[in-house]
């Protein structure tokens, strides 16, 4: 029985002997594996991009919304003849009683025309409190943020985003100027730094005022939501329980709010993107199947081409098993080399993606690369089973005959 | 002493369409160790088929084949492969060297298949090539060798396992007269050293040199004559 090292060396020699064929199969396998690597890198990059964006929202956050998002006992609460109770500033204040909650920021939001002298523009006006800046981890370019004080103090001050500043004031210094929001006048006390990534809001187009002022402008005593920061990540579940308990007590025993934890949202996105990554990876893996079929065809041609060689090997005492092993070794070596090539090309491709889109951390997950290589070597070898069997069963007399 | 090869009632039928060709039609033949046998006959008479059966490359349709007293038709494919590897050496009309391998590597093939270690293979292959005058051609590929040299490489490959039996099917059929004579000379030298030699040929000159000549017509032995200087030719 031939030694494994000799079988491998012989197979390698055969691969070198048929360069074009070898090159073709390397490319086919390489493309398949590279596709798996690059596509999963893209999927994983998108997932991480979203995860990072969430992290930039601030850590251990909970969001309190008025109304219930779920149904209870099969009957949606809105069908029970009740509109949800307002979420008020007093509700927000009451939340601070929980020792698992570090700080809160009530939010009241609406759109309004903002003007200074003759210039005006439509803007999103966000009413909140002093802690909002720290909770969202935003920072100031100039001036200061909302003053600390009672939540219901409707001071006539505002903080504006960079775009609003440019469009209203141009080269005139904005700090200290009075602008109009609807019917009300506000003094500009700060300008927001354009923060890095943030989901959903463009800080540069915002106007921020005290929450009580916003409630007055929009004539709406109900809060849009309350952002709550727990003391630590571990405090999140207890903070959530406290929020539900406190609000229920204040709302006559009705649980008419929804608390979203950042973790839950993140987990959902995570699941979606993982599924997406798996899906594109799977589609790319199909190309490996195609490469496998190509390998099968090329190996079938090789067996036909090398009939005399196979006949000779049999005459010299090669068992059917040895012939089988020789051809399988050829296919395995070839698909391994192809997979290796694909891995390199795929990594280079991911690198190029990262170069082109620096915000996207496009690194292929290790399990995807591993799976790509395993599927490549697996299909390459498996699809060569049929040609290798055919070679092993070849009648040596017929194989040696010249025709 | 038991014969090296003993064939009894060997038949080999080929089905071609709905016709059956009797390539071998009841062959009885015994070959002793050390013999030098020429098989002759017209084209299509069954010479190659007979050689293939003896070489375990082909299984007879019927009949009994004993190699060194053992019924080899009962062996599995794997066992037959092992017997071919150790006991039988083939020399073909078209050499059948692997084109991408050097002379040395071609000669090493049977040893590689036997699982012999690389160092030993290299030494033995070199020694045999040396003996056949190919020392300076060891690292040449077949396309860099003349026909006569290629056939000598093939003979080196056939003998490197020190087989009991060499089967040569028209070994000079593709060579010029000079190279052909050289190759026959080498084969006869090997026979003189004790290896049993069976040569299929339609060259009467070569057949005349063999000590025994079996003539086949239509798959049956028509004559089996020894060229014995003491007793003359017998039928
Ligand atoms: N594989 C085969 N299929 C069908 N017929 C065959 C096959 N091999 C040989 N034959 C037939 O068997 C007969 C003997 O062939 P062969 O042994 O090659 O003759 P020789 O070597 O004496 O020229 C011929 O008639 C040939 O056509
Ligand atoms: Mg013939």
Image (spheres, rainbow, N blue to C red):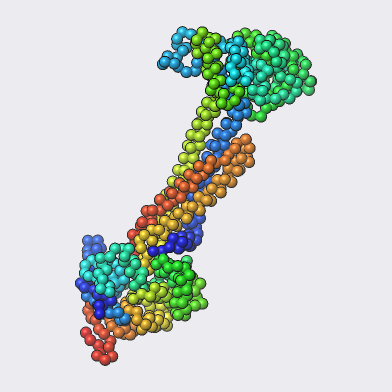
The answer to whether residue B206 shows anywhere in this view is yes
Seen at 50% across and 31% down, the residue is: A272
Seen at 56% across and 48% down, the residue is: A345
Q: Which residue is at the front of the view, B6 or B216? A: B6
Q: Position of residue A291 (x, y in %)?
A: 45, 48
Seen at 37% across and 76% down, the residue is: B171
Q: Where is residue A403 in the image (x, y as percent from the top left)?
A: 36, 66
Q: Position of residue A171 (x, y in %)?
A: 78, 22
Name the quarter where the C terminus of chain B is drawn.
bottom left
Q: Quadrant of residue B83?
A: bottom left
Residue A330 against residue B161 in the figure, above or below: above
Q: Which residue is at the front of the view, A81 or B222? A: A81
Q: Which residue is at the front of the view, B13 or A70? A: A70
Q: In which quarter of the image is ligand 2?
A: bottom left
Q: Which residue lies furthest to the right in this view?
A: A172
Seen at 29% across and 67% down, the residue is: B58
Q: Which residue is at the front of the view, B108 or A346? A: B108
In the figure, is residue A20 to the left or right of B159?
right
């Amino acid at each position: 029985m031939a030694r494994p090292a000799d079988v491998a060396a012989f197979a390698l020699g055969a691969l070198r002997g048929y360069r074009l064929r070898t090159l073709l199969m390397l490319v086919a396998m390489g493309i398949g594996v590279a596709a798996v690597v690059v596509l999963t890198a893209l999927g994983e990059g998108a997932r991480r991009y979203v995860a990072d964006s969430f992290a930039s929202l601030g850590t251990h956050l909970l969001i309190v919304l008025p109304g219930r998002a779920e149904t209870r006992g099969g009957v949606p609460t809105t069908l029970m003849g009740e509109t949800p109770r307002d979420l008020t500033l007093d509700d927000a204040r009451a939340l601070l009683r929980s020792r698992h909650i570090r700080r809160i920021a009530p939010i009241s939001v609406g759109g309004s025309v903002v003007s200074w002298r003759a210039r005006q523009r439509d803007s999103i006006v966000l009413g909140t409190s002093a802690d909002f800046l720290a909770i969202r981890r935003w920072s100031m370019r100039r001036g200061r943020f909302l003053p600390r004080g009672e939540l219901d103090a409707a001071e006539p001050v505002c903080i504006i985003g960079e775009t609003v500043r440019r469009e209203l004031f141009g080269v005139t210094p904005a700090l200290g100027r009075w602008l109009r929001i609807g019917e009300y006048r506000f003094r500009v006390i700060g300008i927001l730094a354009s923060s890095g990534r943030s989901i959903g809001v463009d800080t540069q187009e915002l106007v921020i005022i005290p929450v009580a002022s916003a409630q007055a402008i929009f004539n709406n005593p109900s809060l849009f939501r309350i952002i709550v920061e727990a003391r630590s990540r571990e405090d999140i579940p207890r903070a959530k329980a406290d929020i539900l308990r406190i609000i229920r007590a204040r709302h006559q025993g009705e649980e008419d709010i929804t608390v979203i934890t950042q973790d839950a949202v993140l987990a959902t996105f995570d699941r979606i993107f993982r599924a997406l990554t798996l899906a594109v990876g799977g589609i790319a893996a199909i190309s490996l199947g195609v490469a496998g079929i190509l390998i099968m065809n090329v190996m079938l041609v090789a067996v036909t081409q090398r009939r005399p060689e196979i006949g000779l090997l049999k005459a010299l005492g090669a068992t059917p098993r040895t012939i089988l092993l020789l051809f399988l070794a050829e296919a395995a070596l070839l698909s391994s080399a192809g997979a290796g090539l694909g891995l390199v090309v795929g990594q280079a491709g991911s690198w190029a993606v990262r170069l082109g889109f620096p915000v996207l951390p496009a690194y292929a997950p290790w399990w995807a690369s591993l799976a790509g290589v395993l599927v490549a070597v697996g299909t390459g070898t498996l699809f060569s089973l049929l040609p290798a069997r055919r070679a092993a069963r070849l009648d040596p007399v017929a194989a040696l005959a010249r025709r | 002493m038991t014969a090296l090869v003993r064939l009894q009632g060997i038949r080999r039928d080929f089905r071609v369409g709905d016709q059956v060709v009797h390539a071998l039609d009841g062959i009885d033949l015994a070959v002793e160790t050390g013999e030098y046998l020429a098989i002759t006959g017209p084209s299509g008479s069954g010479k190659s088929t007979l050689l293939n059966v003896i070489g375990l490359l082909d299984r007879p349709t019927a009949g009994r084949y004993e190699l060194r007293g053992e019924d080899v038709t009962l062996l599995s494919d794997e066992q037959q492969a092992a017997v071919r590897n150790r006991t039988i050496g083939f020399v073909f009309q078209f050499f059948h060297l692997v084109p991408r391998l050097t002379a040395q590597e071609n000669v090493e093939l049977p040893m590689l298949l036997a699982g012999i270690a690389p160092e030993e293979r290299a030494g033995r292959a070199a020694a045999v090539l040396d003996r056949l005058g190919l020392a300076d051609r060891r690292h040449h590929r077949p396309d860099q060798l003349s026909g006569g040299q290629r056939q000598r490489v093939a003979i080196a490959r056939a003998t490197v396992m020190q087989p009991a039996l060499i089967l040569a099917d028209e070994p000079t059929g593709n060579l010029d007269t000079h190279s052909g004579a050289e190759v026959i000379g080498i084969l006869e030298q090997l026979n003189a050293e004790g290896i049993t030699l069976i040569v299929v040929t339609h060259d009467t000159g070569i057949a005349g040199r063999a000590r025994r000549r079996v003539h086949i017509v239509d798959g049956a032995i028509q004559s089996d004559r020894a060229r014995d200087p003491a007793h003359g030719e017998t039928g």
